[in-house]
Image: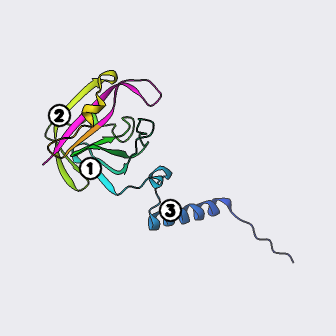
Amino acid sequence: MEIRKTVDLRKLTIVLYSMFFVVYLIFGLTPAEATQYETAKKLAIPAIGLQSDVTDLKLENYALKTPDTIVGSFAGAENNTLLIGHSSGIFENLNLLKVDDEIIYDEKLYVVKEIGILEKKDVDMSEILSSREVDTITIMTCAGEDYGNGDASHRLIVKASLK
């Protein structure tokens, strides 16, 4: 008499998904992009429910490549850090921020002092990256008409100073 073992594909699928979920819980697997960046800093904006890892960016061919799912930072000058991210992703609610809202960046508390929208052609990057007397973060993301290629007609710019 021959005994055949059969495999129930539904049960096998459930077992495999369960094993993956357990591994995820134990090791905290993250999306591929988050693992390709060093993310020692954190950004939190409680007023809009934002929490993100932050990666340091390097200037390449006079441009900064914006990460897709986390915030990028660039220390432009003394006491001034530029934070960038996509308005269709991490900064989708940045437009809801108000003056005097608090921002926690790199374990320091900042307060929003200015919020503005400029046409892309009117953005003066040398001014945005210039040194400040007080420790400042400048957050910038796209706004206005979406060009459909990861760019837009305007920039939303938020400036916050150390409290």
On the rendered structure, is 102 left or right of 70?
left
Above or below 37: residue 117? above
Residue type pointed to by label 2:
Glu
* Quarter of the image where one finds residue 143: top left
SS label for mark 1: strand
Residue receiving disc 3: 21
Image position, residue 12 (x, y; %): 64, 63
Task: Work out which quarter of the rendered image holds the N terminus and state it.
Answer: bottom right
Type of secondary structure dominating the magenta stretch: strand
Packing grade of label 1 (10 A; few <14, some 14-19, many >=20) is some
For marks 1 and 3 on the same chain, the one whose residue lies earlier in the sequence? 3
On the rendered structure, is 103 left or right of 67?
left
Residue in the image at 39% along x and 39% along y: 89
* Gap in angstroms between the C-alphas marked 1 and 3: 27 Å
On the rendered structure, is 26 left or right of 119?
right
Residue receiving disc 2: 114
Residue in the image at 23% along x and 47% along y: 46
SS label for mark 3: helix
Can see residue 33?
A: yes
Foreground mark, 1 or 3, reads 1
* Quarter of the image where one finds residue 160: top left
Q: Nearer the viewer, residue 77 or 97?
A: 77
Residue range highlighted in magenta: 140-163
Above or below 20: residue 152? above
Packing grade of label 3 (10 A; few <14, some 14-19, many >=20) is few
Residue 157 included in the magenta stretch of the image: yes
Residue receiving disc 1: 44
Image position, residue 150 (x, y; %): 44, 31
Q: Nearer the viewer, residue 68 or 65?
A: 65
For marks 2 and 3 on the same chain, the one whose residue lies earlier in the sequence? 3
